[in-house]
């Protein structure tokens, strides 16, 4: 299942979490959930998860900075129920 902002079916973090849980609750098999949050201009604002700067900006700060920002985004999305 891919949750994207243009669907407008989950306007905030609580609704996103509920949407994922409700779909998982009716499925006979495990469901992987994903969204498109790459950082820069590709950012799912409704998650309220901090979004990494654009690749050019983040990359200029070095690999440690990129890894830290990506880890923060990943942890925030995982807390909402996203798998990948």
Image (cartoon, rainbow, N blue to C red):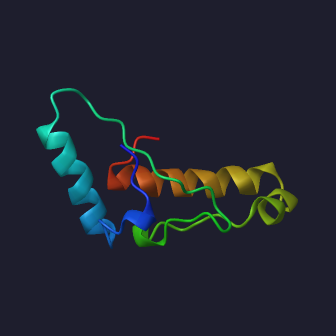
Q: Residue furthest right?
A: 60
Where, quadrant-wise, is the N terminus in this rendering?
top left
Q: Is residue 24 above or below residue 80?
A: above
Is residue 13 toward the left or the right of residue 70 in the image? left
Is residue 16 toward the left or the right of residue 48 in the image? left
> What percent of the width, then of the height, locates residue 68?
65, 54
Q: Is residue 68 above or below residue 48?
A: above
**Residue lying at 12% horizontally and 39% vertically, measured from the top left:** 26
Is residue 23 toward the left or the right of residue 75 in the image? left
Q: Residue furthest left?
A: 26
Q: Which of the two residues, 69 or 17, is positioned nearer the viewer here? A: 17
Quarter location, residue 38: bottom right
> What percent of the width, then of the height, locates residue 23?
20, 46
> What percent of the width, then of the height, locates residue 55?
77, 58
For the image, the number of numbered tags is 0
Q: Residue furthest front?
A: 7
**Residue lying at 41% horizontally and 41% vertically, measured from the top left:** 83
**Residue lying at 82% horizontally and 56% vertically, measured from the top left:** 59
Q: Is residue 9 above or below residue 30?
A: below
Is residue 57 toward the left or the right of residue 22 in the image? right
Q: Which of the two residues, 54 or 28, is positioned nearer the viewer here? A: 28
> What percent of the width, then of the height, locates residue 66?
72, 54
Quarter location, residue 51: bottom right
């Amino acid at each position: 299942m891919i949750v994207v902002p243009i669907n407008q079916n989950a306007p905030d973090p609580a609704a996103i979490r509920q949407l994922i849980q409700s779909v998982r609750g009716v499925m006979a098999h495990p469901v992987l959930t994903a969204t498109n949050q790459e950082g820069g201009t590709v950012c799912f604002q409704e998650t309220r998860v901090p979004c990494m700067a654009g690749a050019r900006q983040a990359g200029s700060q070095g690999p440690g900075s990129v890894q830290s920002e990506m880890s923060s985004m990943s942890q925030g999305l995982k807390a909402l129920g996203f798998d990948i």
